[in-house]
Image (spheres, helix red, strand yellow):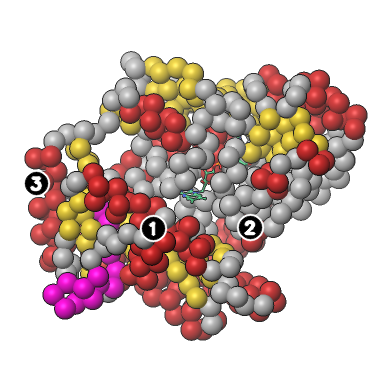
Amino acid sequence: MAQYNKVTAEVVEKLKAIAPNRVFAGEEINEDYIHDEMPIYGKFAPEAVVEAASTEEISEIMKVCNENCIPVIPRGAGTGLAGGAVAIEGGVVLCTTRMNKILEYDMENLSVRVQPGVLLQNLADDAATRGLLYPPDPGEKFATLGGNVSTNAGGMRAVKYGTTRDYVRAMTVVLPTGEIVKFGSNVKKTSTGYSLLNLMIGSEGTLGIITEITLKLVPAPKEIISLIVPFEDLNACIGAVPKVLLSGLNPQALEFMEKDIVRMSEKYLEKQVFPQVIDGVEAGAYLLISFDGDSMEELEQISEQASEILFEEGAIDILVADTPELKKNAWAARGSFLEAIQADTDELDECDVVVPISKIAEYLEYVNSLEEKHGLRIRSFGHAGDGNLHIYACRDGKPEAEWKEKCEAVMDDMYARANEIGGLVSGEHGIGHAKQEYLERCVGPVEMGIMQNIKKVFDPNLILNPGKVCYKL
Ligand SMILES: Cc1cc2nc3c(=O)[nH]c(=O)nc-3n(C[C@H](O)[C@H](O)[C@H](O)COP(=O)(O)OP(=O)(O)OC[C@H]3O[C@@H](n4cnc5c(N)ncnc54)[C@H](O)[C@@H]3O)c2cc1C
């Protein structure tokens, strides 16, 4: 393990000379920098924060930190859910949110060049004014694109359009040693050696700092329609998913949700959208499906064909959300699940596994059985169209020691079963420092060793984001 040095007053002065008025140390550091959006993974105060303004500045900062063996933790908006952007070994948090310019659209190559601190929502809105869509659609719209690329963020539209990885064509990276490199190019395909571009995507700030990104865009579909589909139980609900996927109707989003979490979210938003009892039958679970296309006529046809399939698979009703109001309310309820669960308990831990679509129902049945086995309330929802599940263990006022023990036991069981059925540790939130142990159990020593060797090639002094992903302290 590397031996790190403290950020001395002399080092702070060197950083200030590089980034005047944008270096904060000790008491000046804003509380927000000591955690991400999962407080259960701990609070860690950095010794300094630099709010960087350019690639060249970041390069100079990295040279100082590398020479002095000081940890550097790249950070975007801090909305991560795996403890990736926190300073567990102290050192310098390098924040990119000031680098927030959309630099240039290239309409001929359907792409856009951005700085890493541009917020997802800002690019989505700006692209829309040009009739374009940036398809990745993670739930947190105020995350940065640098953070999205570094975690390979997914989101609701992954079932049709793929994840962030599918939209990154090129990037500028500052290596831990301070060298500036460009990976990829603004081309549609490549067989040009190892893809270091793809290695960077999802590397959670452990290999280099992303300082500029070229992203692919697509023409925006003109119309969207959503279907709210209640089923009597979760098995029927999940059972319908492969049929919809096989139909060739190509849904843009395909989410499942159990009734408890829907009620919780409706209560949180003080708005009821999802039907509860239909002809005397209580809905136990729902699919929320969206289709996009160029005309309402086309979408009406698609939704008719989808309805036929869904009724055959046991849907007890189908509500077509074709007005902006209903669509907004249905997706707002879905988008608020995490906040609703957070508001309903004092602390929670999350599991973000991805499993083969054919195994979702069986896996969730197992997960639900853990409530009784461990005496802990569990809530789940997820992207049925791509097998990525978000499962939450709720503390509900349990004393610290009991909560820790039960939570660990539940997580151990969930990750172990996901592993057995061919699943992986994280579908979109990443490993950070919180899920390292599960990564190791999942991929085994050989793959872990390869990752650690790659880390050393990029970062010989192991200063970049220590204790994250494969590099254990
Ligand atoms: C309510 C809510 C809903 C969410 N929904 C989704 C969802 O649907 N899908 C999804 O995938 N995620 C979701 N997330 C998680 C989170 O928004 C994503 O992980 C996001 O990509 C993090 O971006 P950020 O700018 O906040 O990055 P941060 O949290 O600041 O950092 C995340 C990681 O990226 C690294 N990093 C950040 N910027 C750079 C850079 N420029 N260069 C190198 N490394 C960098 C950090 O070191 C860290 O390891 C959700 C979070 C919340 C709170």
Task: Tell me the tag on residue 269.
Answer: 1
Which type of secondary structure does the marked residue at label 1 adopt? helix
**Residue 49, percent across and down?**
74, 36
Q: Which residue is mark 3?
A: 301
Q: CB atoms at circles 3 and 1 under 8 Å apart?
A: no
Q: Nearer the viewer, residue 460 or 329?
A: 329
Which residue is at 20% across, 51% downward? 321
Of tags 2 and 3, the one toward the viewer is 2
Q: Nearer the viewer, residue 411 or 379?
A: 379
Which type of secondary structure does the marked residue at label 3 adopt? helix
Please indicate, yes or no, whether residue 357 appears anywhere in the rendered image: no
Where, by quadrant of the figure, is residue 15 drawn?
A: top right
**Residue 450, percent across and down?**
64, 47
Q: What amino acid is found at the position of numbered circle 1 in the picture? A: Leu
* Among numbered discs 1 and 2, the one appearing first in the sequence: 2
Q: Residues within 10 Å of mark 2 (few under 14, many from 20)?
A: some
Task: Answer left or right for 28 relative to 327.
Answer: right
As for residue 277 lying within the magenta part, the answer is: yes
Q: Which residues are magenta?
A: 276-290
Which residue is at 57% across, 64% downward? 349
Q: What amino acid is found at the position of numbered circle 3 in the picture? A: Gln
